[in-house]
Every structure is written in C-alpha cells, then in structure tokens.
Amino acid sequence: MSEKTARRHPSALVRELGIPALALFVTVVLWEVLVRAFRVPEFLLPAPSSIASESWSVAGNLGMHGLATLRTVLLGFVVSVAISLPMALAITSSPAVGNAIYPLLVLTQSVPKVALAPLLVVILGANELPRVVVTFLVAFFPLVISISTGLLAVPPELLELGRACKATWRQELVRIRLPYAVPFIFSGFKVAITLCVVGAVVAEFVNADQGLGYLIVTSTAFFKVPLAFGAVILLSVMGIVLFQLIVVLERWLFPWSAAGNQREVH
C-alpha cells in the first residue's frame, strides 16, 4: 500500500501545483495579448508587463507597505483567535450563555465595517489600533461559529463514554471535544486569515499613512493604475501564502485531521 501511495505522489503534485500554475500562466499571457491587441489604455487596464515593471521600480516602497499590512493582518488574526476560542467555549458550555451571546455576535456582523471604521478612528485615535480592531471584527465571527460547531458536533456516544468513566468537564473538553473540533477550528482559521487581509485593507482605506490599502488609494488618485494593480496582486499573494501556512501547520500538528479533510475533498 505504501508503494502504491508513493507512486501517486508525482501525479498528485502535478495536479495540485502544475495545473494551477499552467492556468495562471495562460491567464497572464491572454491578459497581456488582449490588452495589447485592443490597445486598452493603461489607466483602465494595464498589461501584466506594465504592472511588473512599475512594481519592480518601487519594490522597496511596495515591500514596506506590504509589511505594514501584514503586521495589521497578523495582529487582527491573533486577537480574533484569542477572543474567539474562550467565547466559543462559553457558548457551548451553557444554552443560556449561548442564547445571550449569539444576538450580540449577529449584531457585530450586521454593522458594515466600512461604516464603523471612521467611528473607531474618532474613538481610538488615528493609529494602528482602529485598523487592528476592524480586522478583528471581520475575522472573529466565522471563527466563533466554526469552533462552536466543532465543540457541539461530538457524537453523543463519546460524551456518554467519558461520563461513564467519570471524566470531569475539563477532561471532557481537552480529551474529547477539542480533539474532535480540530478540523472545524482549522477550517475557521483558514477563513479568518483570508478575511483578515480583507479587513486590514478596508481599515487602511479609511485610516492609514502606510499599507497596501493606503497605497491603492493614493496610486489610483494619481492614476498610477499599474502600481495599484501591483498592490492588489501582492495582497492576493499574501492571502494565499497565509492560507497555505495554516494548511501546513494543520498537517504538521494534526496530520490525522488534514488527511481526513483531503479524503472529504477527493
């Protein structure tokens, strides 16, 4: 069985990496050809070569803005994890607590973050804190829902077995509920980290003196559209890399969970 699995690895690698890379290459080539063939103005849709040239000419500045956005993304993600986990535990510990917290969660999601960002600037000041708060608000709701779903999805038979063995609430949580919820938790992490990128950019549109969102706003204001596209592409790469880091972390810490997710996908 192991030899058969080993023989599948090259084809799996081609399927997972080769096909997406080929599709991306074809898309970029078609983009370049069509823009040049139809002579689309650069301020409407720049060619990939123009985007690459403009971005490379200010690579240091682009990297500085990228690091500023990355810092906001990671801070918002860490805060969302730190608050979502205990909140999910509180929700699942008691139906009464869950009924009290859920309406507040829905309320936070119903408020548009773009509308909330200027108010946070007035309340918290024109610094990085409002951007981190907006990023947190965008990301923490799916995390709470994913963790709560995982904690409540444990088969009743396992809980009955634990109670029959006289497990305490803490033992039941650590040895039964949390291990069973690991796939749900990491699914929430994957969604949250990509939403953090969105939240950070939204916050930078409103209040920032650096960051990729700030760079996009200033570039489009001066019709430097290729540079704005370069910032957007860098944001996409950032989201993909952070998502894949979560995937790798899950495979490293909980290989059984990652293997189960792959079987469900296939």
Image: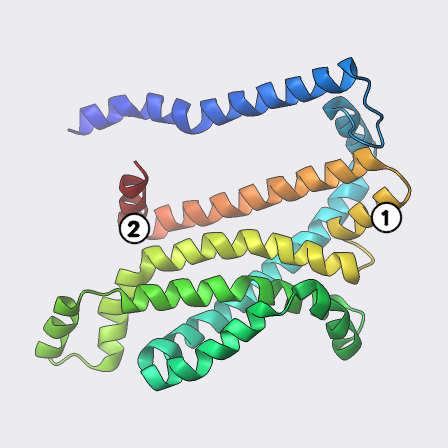
* Residue neighbourhood size for the residue with mark 2, other residues' Cα within 10 Å, grouped as few (<14), some (14–19), many (≥20): some
| Residue that badge 2 annotates | 257
**Along the line of sight, the residue nearer the viewer: 263 or 7:** 263
Q: Earlier in the sequence, mark 1 or mark 2?
A: 1
Which mark identifies residue 218?
1
Rendered view: 185 above or below 38: below
* Residue neighbourhood size for the residue with mark 1, other residues' Cα within 10 Å, grouped as few (<14), some (14–19), many (≥20): some
Residue type at the position of mark 2: Ser
- The residue located at (41%, 29%) in the rendering is 16
**Residue 240: where, in percent of width, then height?**
55, 42
Please tell me in which quadrant of the rendered image residue 26 appears: top right
In the image, 150: left or right of 133?
left
Q: Secondary structure at mark 2?
A: helix
In the image, 177: left or right of 116?
left
**Along the line of sight, the residue nearer the viewer: 145 or 209:** 145
Rendered view: 36 above or below 248: above
Please tell me in which quadrant of the rendered image residue 71 appears: bottom right
In the image, 220: left or right of 184?
right
Q: Secondary structure at mark 1?
A: helix
**Residue 95: where, in percent of width, then height?**
33, 82
Residue type at the position of mark 1: Thr
**Marks 1 and 2, how far apart at CA:** 44 Å
